[in-house]
Amino acid sequence: MDILADPISPRSLSKRVVNLIDSITLTAFNYTRRGLLEKHKLIVSTMLTLRILLRKNVLSSAEVEHLTLGKFDPNPPPMPEVLRGFVNDQMWANCKALELLPNPFNNFTQSLEQDYLQWKKWYNDEKAEEADLPKAYKEITKFHKLLLLRAMRPDRLTNALNGFIYESMGEVYVEQSVLDIDATYLETTCQTPIFFVLFPGVEPSGDINFIA
């Protein structure tokens, strides 16, 4: 008589599917990153993270589009005088565009004007992505903080993206290990060769001779 395996419970099946998706995602990412320059790896990690969060309905398409395109108001109203000490015209146009998004940005420029000393302190912080925001915006999500940085402190956006991806996807999508030539070799066959893109000063022949 055949011995049938015990049926898997819905909870176990759900967990198994999640584990499979995570494993396939990481495998695909690792294959992709092998052919990327270092400066492009964060772009791919960001695109992957945003796409996954969109499919999970954690983020809205309007928010993601705003981050990637950097939208601005082409005809903003006059800027309050109290803001001119640290906000330029481009930043003001960026901030007005944030108000087109849903909460928490409905009355963002009003907060800027009312709490301008707190916003100025945050803006002038060397690491604005780590600094506390004014009270009214202190509890916003890390993604919404990305939108603020995109509008007012784009110079700190790269650091903030690394932190966002780390929290959303895990360390492996931010801190990748150096290419393991031995592991890569084991994946190859005579129909699946390895291609090396060489740059000045790079000499892989020692590694190639070693595994050969």
Image (spheres, grey):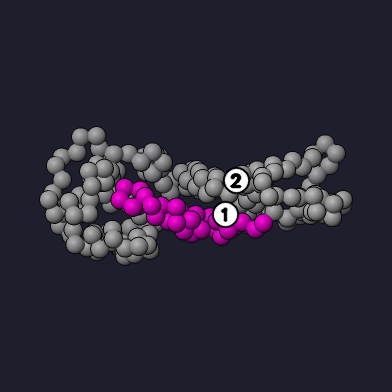
Q: Residues within 10 Å of mark 2 (few under 14, many from 20)?
A: few
Name the residue that disc number 2 marks: 37
Secondary structure at numbered mark 2: loop
Q: Which mark is residue 173?
A: 1
**Magenta region: which residues?**
149-178
138 vs 186: above or below: below
Residue 170 among those drawn in magenta: yes
Secondary structure at numbered mark 1: helix
Q: How far is disc 2 from disc 1 in space, using C-alphas?
A: 15 Å
In depth, the one of 120 and 186 nearer the eye is 120
Query: Which of pointers 2 and 1 lies earlier in the amino acid sequence?
Result: 2
Q: In x, y percent, where is residue 189?
A: 84, 42
Check the image and name the residue furthest to the top: 74
Instruction: Say which amino acid is labelled 1.
Output: Tyr
Residue 20 falls left or right of residue 116: right
Residue 108 falls left or right of residue 204: left
Q: In x, y percent, where is residue 29?
A: 62, 47
Q: In x, y percent, where is residue 119?
A: 23, 59
Residue 96 falls left or right of residue 196: left
Residue occupying the point 18% across, 60% down? 115
Which tag is nearer the camera, tag 2 or tag 1?
2
Image quarter for residue 156? bottom left
For the stretch drawn in magenta, the main secondary structure is: helix
Residue occupying the point 79% across, 39% down? 192
Residue 25 falls left or right of residue 63: right
Residue occupying the point 43% across, 49% down? 58
Q: Is residue 100 visible?
A: no
Q: Are marks 2 and 1 in contact (CB under 8 Å)?
A: no
